[in-house]
Amino acid sequence: MSMIGNQPSYGKYYTLDAIVTDGSTAYSLLKDTVAQTNLQAEQLIVSVNGAIQAPGSSFTVSGGTITFAEALTVSDSVDFITVIGEAHNVATVSDGAVSASKLGSDVAVTNTPVRINSNTIDTNFTVGANQNALVAGPIDINAEIIVQGTFTVV
């Protein structure tokens, strides 16, 4: 993809399957024949007869269906529908993606992942048989700690 400026380092951009017009206003949005139901009109670039369409006024999206403001005749051509990103409710951070420099100052000291402890354990917990736990003191323990593995106080 040619562009001016830096290439995006992440994102999901793809073109949907071709739509064959038949005089209707509503058409299914498919990618590799699979319905795309999590899209919004504002994230689509839609070209009909060589003209980019305005989301919200020229077309709307609901579920897996795009609905055009006017019926598309059999002689009309949907040139392409490109999806720019995807809508979702919860973002998931990739494993290993958080570095020490991304942590807040109350968690990280300089460039090392040093945790500042509150000097008090107020919540009961268990260190499992296959687990190791470490706490840096001085520390007040006001809760029950069950140690089946290793618990070290430094």
Image (cartoon, grey):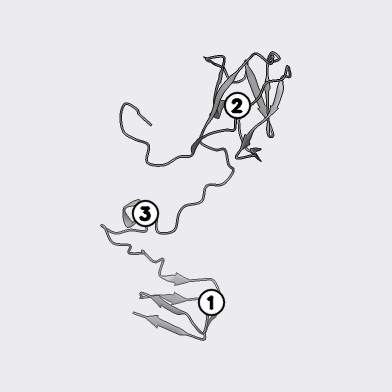
Kindly identify the amino acid type of the residue bearing the numbered disc 1.
Ala
Residue 27, placed above or below residue 124: above
Task: Judge the density around disc 1: few (<14), some (14-19), many (≥20) Cα neighbours within 10 Å.
Answer: few
Label 1, label 2: how many angstroms apart (C-alpha)? 53 Å
Residue 96, placed above or below residue 82: below
Residue 130, placed above or below residue 63: below
Q: In which quarter of the image is the C terminus?
A: bottom left
Q: Nearer the viewer, mark 3 or mark 2?
A: 2
Label 3, label 1: how many angstroms apart (C-alpha)? 28 Å
Q: Quadrant of residue 98?
A: bottom left
Secondary structure at badge 3 equals: loop
In the figure, is residue 61 to the left or right of 138? Answer: right
Work out whether mark 3 precedes mark 2 in sequence or the reverse, and give the earlier one: 2
Work out whether mark 1 precedes mark 2 in sequence or the reverse, and give the earlier one: 2
The residue pinned by badge 2 equals 41
Evaluate if marks 3 and 2 touch, with contact meaning CB atoms under 8 Å apart. Answer: no
Q: Nearer the viewer, residue 35 or 105?
A: 35
Q: Residue at x 34, y 35 (%)?
A: 7
Q: Which of 146 and 140 is in front in this view?
A: 146
Q: Residue at x 49, y 82 (%)?
A: 130
The residue pinned by badge 3 equals 103
The residue pinned by badge 1 equals 143
Q: Which of 44 and 96 is in front in this view?
A: 44
Kindly identify the amino acid type of the residue bearing the numbered disc 2.
Ala
Kindly identify the amino acid type of the residue bearing the numbered disc 3.
Leu
Task: Judge the density around disc 2: few (<14), some (14-19), many (≥20) Cα neighbours within 10 Å.
Answer: some
In the figure, is residue 35 to the left or right of 138? Answer: right
